[in-house]
Image (cartoon, rainbow, N blue to C red):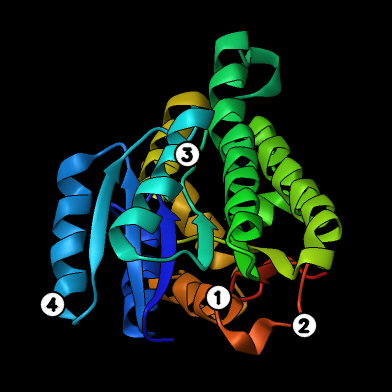
Amino acid sequence: MTNKVAVVTGSGQGIGRAIALHLAKDGFNIGLVDVKKDKIAAVAKEIEALGQKATTITGDISVREEVYGAIEQAEKDLGGFDVMVNNAGIAQVNALADVTPEEVEKIFKINVQGALWGIQAAAKKFIARKQKGKIVSACSIAGQEGYAMLGIYSATKFAVRALTQAAAKEYASQGITVNAYCPGVVGTDMWVEIDKRFHETTGAPLGETYKKFVGGIALGRAETPDDVANLVSFLASPASDYITGQSILTDGGMVYR
């Protein structure tokens, strides 16, 4: 895959960073997109230490023009565009009875519209370049099963799964595959925040919610960012050329479909 280019949103830390580094090891040059400029600058240095090129793009995925602009910059700086990873997203913990309009608007703008703009912009660029391409988006076990206190987050991830299926059907004739990955309980800052919010809203002791969810994993351990990156590496590779429209669980055995 030498000289291939992948754009990864939310790549300053956690799962996004792991995906970017894994794809760099696979031979991709990486367009790093995040709202945290200093964090993607650090990841860029890690990628360059692996012998690959990286460009950093500070952008907000909820803003359509910024997503389109990120792909344009990555293509210009790195000389191509082959894979789009719509990884960026946020979580929210709240009872449905207490969810506010502001909370709904914020999470849908980032998790749903952000994925949509990424799909749109990537497909448009692939078609303009007259080439095949791969789009991979972040779903979740919460996109396969709704969870109490995570109802609105679950709704956004169900929406990503729907967009993945619809886009796969719309773009198949152009040789563009569209898939998603569905992590479970990953030991990242997002889960630290989820655990904290469960503590604040339900009174559960700090660490208890995380421990409870991890206790339900068949393989007996929490997921790592690299576990997710391994699947994304496959979906970004020629080995997945005959797979499209799928939202694949990578959760160690929590949700079974």
Tell me if residue 81 can be seen.
yes
Give the mark, 1 or 4, whose residue is nearer the N terminus: 4
Give the residue drawn at x 76%, y 77%.
243
Query: Is the C-beta separation of discs 2 and 3 under 8 Å?
Result: no
Give the residue drawn at x 32%, y 83%.
25
What residue sits right under mark 4 in the picture? 49
Amino acid found under the numbered disc labelled 4: Ala
Amino acid found under the numbered disc labelled 3: Val
Callout 4: SS: helix
Give the mark, 2 or 3, whose residue is nearer the N terminus: 3
Where, quadrant-wise, is the C terminus in this rendering? Answer: bottom right
Which of the pair 182/163 is nearer the observer? 163
Which of the pair 22/190 is nearer the observer? 22
- Left or right of 75, for residue 65: right
Query: Is the C-beta separation of discs 1 and 4 under 8 Å?
Result: no
Q: Which of marks 4 and 3 is in front?
A: 3
Residue 108 horizontal/vertical position (percent): 62, 28
Residue 81 horizontal/vertical position (percent): 47, 64
Callout 2: SS: loop
What residue sits right under mark 2 in the picture? 242
Tell me if residue 139 can be seen.
no
Amino acid found under the numbered disc labelled 1: Ala
